[in-house]
Amino acid sequence: KPPYSYATLIRYAIQNSPSRKLTLSQIYQWVMERYPYYSTAGTGWKNSIRHNLSLNKSFVRVPRPVNEPGKGSYWMVD
């Protein structure tokens, strides 16, 4: 298990993306690609990611542009 908090993992994922914003599923993907532990760790960590995104004031939800198909909002670091 990586020695980082979920908030830190989220921040790394967003800050390392070219657009500096990611959807929830992109954050999950980033974490699993860099830390294979999470690929086999069940689903509890995903609940923790969502919990951190919604409660941590340094993460901001950004609506998806109308001309961009897909599901969910983007998340950015404030």
Image (cartoon, rainbow, N blue to C red):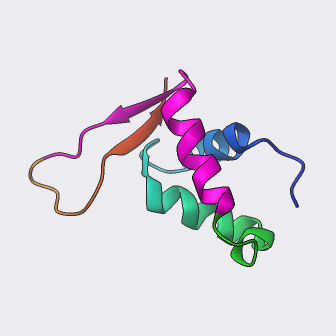
Q: Quadrant of the N terminus?
A: bottom right
51 or 25: nearer the viewer: 51
Q: Inspect the magenta stretch and tell me whether residue 3 lies in it.
A: no
- Residue with the most extreme bottom position: 40
Residue 8 seen by the camera:
yes
Q: Where does residue 22 sit, x and y in percent of width and height?
A: 44, 50
Q: Give the extent of the magenta segment.
A: 44-65
Residue 45, located in which quarter of the rendered image? bottom right
Vertical arrangement, residue 34 with respect to residue 58, above or below: below
Return the x and y of residue 23 as percentages of the image width and height.
41, 53
Picture coordinates of residue 62 (x, y %)? 31, 35
Where in the figure is residue 47, as x and y percent of width and height? 59, 53
* Magenta-drawn stretch contains 58: yes
Rendered image quadrant of residue 30 = bottom right
Residue at 52% from the left image edge and 38% from the top image edge:
53
Q: Is residue 62 left or right of residue 50?
A: left
Left or right relative to 70: residue 34:
right
Residue at figure coordinates x 60%, y 37% from the top left: 52
Q: Is residue 31 left or right of residue 59?
A: right
Between 25 and 11, the one lying in front of the other is 25
- Farthest residue, direction left: 67
The residue at 16%/62% (across/down) is 69
Q: Is residue 44 above or below residue 11?
A: below
* Residue at the (63%, 39%) spot, across then down: 11
Report if residue 13 is visible in the image.
no
